[in-house]
Amino acid sequence: MEKQNLPPFIPFLASALILAAMGLAGLFLLFNLTLPTLAPRWLFFFLTTITASGLSLPVIYFLHWRFPSPTPVTAGIIVRQAIWVGLYFDLLAWFQMGRFLTLPLGFALAAGLGAIEFAIRLAERSRFVAGENE
């Protein structure tokens, strides 16, 4: 089986380091310098998304490198999946703030987001390109 052509890793690593550093520094400042009012709460969700997306970018790249798919993976797909991870952690934090988070709900959220990503990838794979199979 041929190795899939992935985009280069260095831009993903640089983006991941910048996003993770900005998000973690922002969360540190947010926790130490603000009170839990409405605006800092929304800033918390924004910074959580940035942090989780930045930390998951290299992991997602490695998973695509280790387990190649038959369809080519672009940089947009890897970034989109990292944003899904950030959204997942935001939803977990949102439900935990309301004391509503349970283990089955966490798994259901992960399965739902996974199903959405699967449907998007399926639509990308079945897209018609003129002259491709001629």
Image (cartoon, helix red, strand yellow):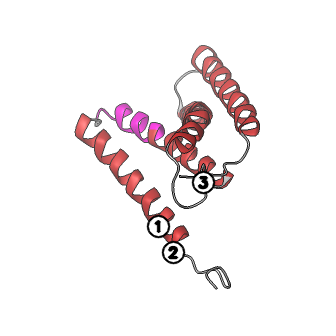
Q: SS for tag 2? A: loop
Marks 2/3 in contact by CB < 8 Å: the verdict is: no
Residue 127 at x, y = what percent? 56, 76
Give amino acid for label 2: Ser
Q: Amino acid at mark 1?
A: Leu
- Residue at the top extreme, as displayed: 32
The residue pinned by badge 1 equals 122
Q: Nearer the viewer, residue 125 or 98?
A: 125
Image quadrant where residue 55 sits: top right
Determine the CA span between mark 2 and mark 3.
Answer: 15 Å
Work out whether residue 85 or residue 101 is closer to the camera in this orientation and state it.
85
> On the picture, is 101 further left or further right than 9?
left
Position of residue 100 measured from the top left corner of the image (x, y, whole percent): 28, 37
Residue at point 65%, 28% (across, down):
20
Residue 78 image offset from top left, x and y in percent: 60, 48
Residue in the picture at 69% in, 24% down: 21
Task: Looking at the image, tell me whether mark 2 or mark 3 is earlier in sequence order.
Answer: 3
Please tell me how crowded label 1 is: few (under 14), some (14-19), or many (20+) other residues with Cα within 10 Å.
few
Tag on residue 126?
A: 2
Query: What is the distance, in whole Å, between disc 1 and disc 2 at their CAs?
Result: 6 Å
- Label 3 environment density (alpha carbons within 10 Å; few <14, some 14–19, many ≥20): some
User: Do labels 1 and 2 touch, CB within 8 Å?
Assistant: yes
Per the rendered image, the range of residues in magenta is 89-99
Give the residue pinned by disc 3.
77
Please tell me in which quadrant of the rendered image residue 10 appears: top right
- Secondary-structure class at tag 3: helix
Residue 119, quarter of the rendered image: bottom left
Label at residue 111:
none
The rendered magenta stretch, by its main secondary structure, is classed as helix
Q: Earlier in the sequence, mark 1 or mark 3?
A: 3
Which residue type does callout 3 highlight? Ile
Q: In the depicted view, which residue is nearer to us: 75 or 34?
A: 75
